[in-house]
Image (cartoon, rainbow, N blue to C red):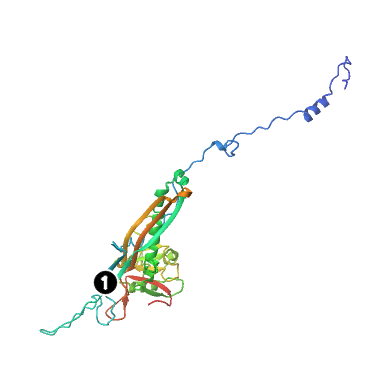
């Protein structure tokens, strides 16, 4: 393109419009730039190490009920222990049955004495084995930031699991290859429930009436029954006399800690609301625990040597049962009391 008006026709000048078009369409593009950032691994995130907290987080299981509530613990040196018990199961009206059949009379001077004899029976504790077993690779054992040995021996590992299962059996065991639980024991009184799937003040008062007056009572109540119980009101004129606030601990005064003067223990180990046994009133001193072998946690590499694995086992040998075989009958020949009373289903009970 020749520029008009230029004196030298040999000089060729580019039209400015074409030059502008060339810069727009033909100029090479510059490379795209990008800031480094920890949000992307390729942009720098791979350079930032993650922080690791070497503490294992877990919810804490509830503590033991029966042992903590004063069960009578007896060390066993053999598989079986036989224990003599005064027989207090008589039901004769007009006679106190606390003395195993011994009778007492008023007599005139020089009157003939009437003989009576005490009777006895025997119960047996037979050690049952409670076990647990697990294993892990040797590499995990070596590399883990959480010490597995301490975990398995702790309250949330094998040792803690044994303690939870033992307590569950002391409350609900059937006695076949395991302890006989309070709920299923022959000495336990079952108080009928007035209204299905509900708990009323009358139910609680009737349970208290059936309870052996030892002065050491404790309520064990299913966690599922809490919302009903904490909203109960007493009879007119004294609507809240049976609730007392918790005296110590977190949440003091927020959830009732005493019912009719006895402490309350909320638990997951009892049946759910409306099921027989969802509420238990007990004196655990009348429950025998026979300890044959303390909880033992052991490990070995040789069980799974060919697989480079370490095995752990826990073993606990124990038995438990109430030493009473039946409720106690008072001297009227009909009224029965027991250190173990549970709330039954509607229309059931003794």
Residue sitting nearer the eye, 179 or 131: 131
Q: Position of residue 202 (x, y in %)?
A: 39, 73
Question: Which quadrant of the structure image shows residue 322?
Answer: bottom left
Question: Which quadrant of the structure image shows residue 262?
Answer: bottom left
Which residue matches tag 1?
A: 85
Q: Position of residue 130 (x, y in %)?
A: 39, 61
Question: Which quadrant of the structure image shows residue 70?
Answer: bottom left
Residue found at x 64% / y 34%: 34
Quarter of the picture containing the C terminus is bottom left
User: Is 136 placed above or below 337 here?
Assistant: above
Visible in this render: residue 153? no
Visible in this render: residue 142? yes
Q: Residue furthest top?
A: 8
User: Is 24 placed above or below 218 here?
Assistant: above
User: Is 311 placed above or below 169 here?
Assistant: above
**Few, some or many residues within 10 Å of mark 1 (<14, 14–19, 20+):** some
Quarter of the picture containing the N terminus is top right
Q: Position of residue 17 (x, y in %)?
A: 83, 26
Residue sitting nearer the eye, 145 or 12: 145
């Amino acid at each position: 393109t020749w520029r008009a008006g230029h004196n030298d026709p040999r000089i060729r000048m580019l039209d400015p419009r074409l030059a502008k078009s060339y810069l727009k369409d033909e100029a090479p593009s510059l490379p795209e730039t990008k800031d480094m950032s920890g949000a992307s691994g390729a942009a720098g995130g791979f350079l930032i190490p993650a922080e690791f907290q070497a503490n294992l987080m877990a919810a804490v299981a509830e503590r033991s009920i029966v042992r903590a509530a004063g069960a009578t613990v007896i060390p066993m040196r053999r598989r079986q222990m036989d224990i003599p018990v005064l027989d207090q199961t008589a039901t004769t009206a007009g006679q106190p049955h606390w003395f195993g059949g011994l009778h007492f009379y008023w007599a005139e001077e020089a009157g003939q004495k009437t003989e009576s004899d005490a009777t006895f029976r025997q119960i047996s504790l037979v050690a049952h084995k409670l076990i647990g077993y697990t294993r892990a690779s040797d590499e995990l054992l070596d590399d883990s930031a959480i010490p597995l040995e301490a975990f398995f021996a702790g309250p949330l590992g094998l040792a803690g699991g044994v303690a939870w299962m033992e307590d569950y059996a002391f409350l609900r065991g059937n006695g076949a290859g395991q302890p006989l639980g309070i709920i299923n024991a022959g000495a336990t009184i079952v108080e009928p429930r007035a209204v299905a799937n509900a708990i009323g003040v009358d139910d609680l008062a009737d349970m208290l009436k059936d309870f052996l007056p030892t002065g050491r009572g404790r309520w064990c109540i299913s966690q599922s029954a809490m919302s009903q119980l904490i909203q109960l009101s007493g009879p007119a004129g004294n609507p809240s006399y049976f609730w007392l606030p918790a005296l110590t601990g977190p949440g003091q005064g927020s959830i009732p800690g005493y019912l009719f003067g006895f402490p309350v223990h909320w638990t997951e180990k009892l049946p759910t609301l409306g099921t027989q046994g969802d509420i238990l009133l007990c004196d655990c001193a009348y429950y025998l625990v026979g300890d044959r072998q303390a909880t033992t946690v052991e490990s070995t590499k040789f069980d799974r040597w060919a697989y480079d694995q370490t095995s752990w086992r826990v073993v606990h040998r124990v038995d438990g049962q109430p030493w009473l075989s039946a409720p106690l009958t008072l001297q009227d020949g009909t009224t029965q009391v027991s250190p173990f009373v549970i709330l039954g289903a509607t229309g059931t009970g003794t």
